[in-house]
Amino acid sequence: MKYELENVNDVIKKVKMELEPEEVEKEVKAICREIGRRAKVPGFRPGKAPASVIKKYYEEDIKDTLLRTLIPQKLAEVLEKEGLNLISDPGVESYNADLKENRVNVVLILEVKPEIEINPEDYKGIKVKRTKRNVGDEDVQKVIEGLRNQSATWKEVDREAKEGDLVELEYETQVEGEEESHKGEVSVVLGQEQLWPEVEKEVLGKKAGEEGEVEFEAPDEEKYGEAKGKKVKVKFKVKSVKEKELPEVNDEFAKRFGFENLEDMKKKILEDLETAEKVREQEEVEDQIIEELLKKVNIPVPPSMLDLEIRAQAQNQLNRLAQIGVDVSQVSPEGIVEMVRPTAEKTVKVKLLLERIAELEGIEVTDEDVESEIQKLADSAFGGDYVKARQSLEEKGLLSMIRQDILRQKALDRLIELAEVEEVEAEEENKEEKEG
């Protein structure tokens, strides 16, 4: 076989292949035999039609089969010889097959994994800081206060409204230049910027049944919506004032959240906070190392990888918006794509970088590594059932992705081992930032 390889760019190659007549003839004969076993050719019993007749009646089928069988085999030889790794299916620019002369010429467009030029000295000894933050009773209390607020009830009171109260309002808003006013009802918590500040100032101090009115020129700020920069008149009536009642923190309160008692609650919250702090420290160091390497190393981004990452991140964004009540059918797909594009591009670069580090450091993923990761998934989502977790991954074709994720994490762990990590107390870090 003869071939020519052309570099279109760092990730796109064009390969022209001319196959040897002998190998084409051999493959065509094998294809004809296979077709002959099931083909119905006029004048011949099944399996008895000669190859010349089969080629006449099934020429296009033979050419298609060559493209699906022999061409991939020959391409694999080129890829191995040139040290190239495909990251998407090849595209066919041109394909000609002459069955009489047993000649095949094909031009393929290849998207390949880019060659990343990086030396060990580029990633060894990177200087980073790990911020140490001590987790204690105060942090536990903050979590408990958050849970108290989640469990709070609202009790109607006969007094003036103050910050933190839940007030129900009837309102009528007239905006300059608009013929009709806007009327409605709303419930807001005072002091949480849920009302325009000019209106909230008038609501504070009012009791249920009292009315108020305020006129002002809305600042040119987004929170005023279509009223920004215009004169506004708001009339309102306070329908009710309610104050928050927080539950008492005791054993019964703890049991609501699945703890045995209050002591057990505090202990497990502290353990969770300590675990979260370790994760934060790890991610802090990882981010610094990655940022430093991205400054040093040029990493071309393959279009197909970027497209897949954009699709995944865009879908995640839409899911998050849907969860908070946004009508995603009104969201511009183009806007979401452009929003996630920079992050998606960085993600692809990081994946390729870590795979290159793994290659340079001789890092491999064992079957035990994969089994351990599947078990973690089983424990978190399948009630500890390893078989169900693995079956789910196999059905979705995600096992190879799991293996790649493990490889990249191992590479990242290796980079941390090779880095020069300085531990800094949180207070010291804040001081340095202020001085800087």
Image (cartoon, rainbow, N blue to C red):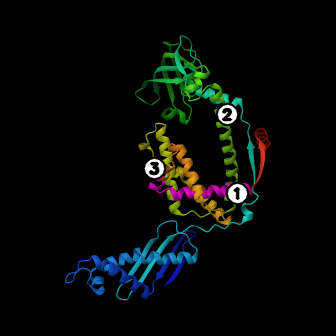
Disc 3 residue crowd, few under 14, some 14–19, many 20+, Cα 10 Å: some
Residue at 55% x, 69% y is 85
Above or below — where is 432 with respect to 244?
Answer: below
Crowd band around label 2 with a 10 angstrom C-alpha radius: few (<14), some (14–19), many (20+): some
The residue that label 2 is drawn on is 270
Q: Inspect the image, locate mark 3, and give the three-letter code of the amino acid beneath it.
A: Pro
- Residue 306 point in image, percent of width and height: 53, 59
Three-letter amino acid code at the position of disc 2: Leu
Residue under label 1? 415
Closer to us: 155 or 367: 367
Do tag 3 and tag 2 residues touch (Cβ < 8 Å)? no
> For residue 407: magenta?
yes
Q: Position of residue 56 (x, y in %)?
A: 28, 83
- Highlighted magenta segment, given as a residue range: 391-417
CA distance for labels 2 and 1: 30 Å
Which residue is the extreme one toward the top? 158
- Give the quarter of the image for residue 122: bottom right
Single out the mark in the foreground, 3 or 2.
2
Disc 3 to disc 1, C-alpha distance: 37 Å
The residue pinned by badge 3 equals 333
As rendered, which of 348 and 259 lies closer to the eye?
259
Nearest the viewer among 266 and 368 is 368
Of badges 2 and 1, the one in the foreground is 2
In primary-sequence order, the first of circles 2 and 1 is 2
Q: CA distance from mark 3 to mark 2?
A: 42 Å
Tell me the element at label 3: helix
**Amino acid type at image mark 1:** Leu
Find residue 376 and name its label.
none
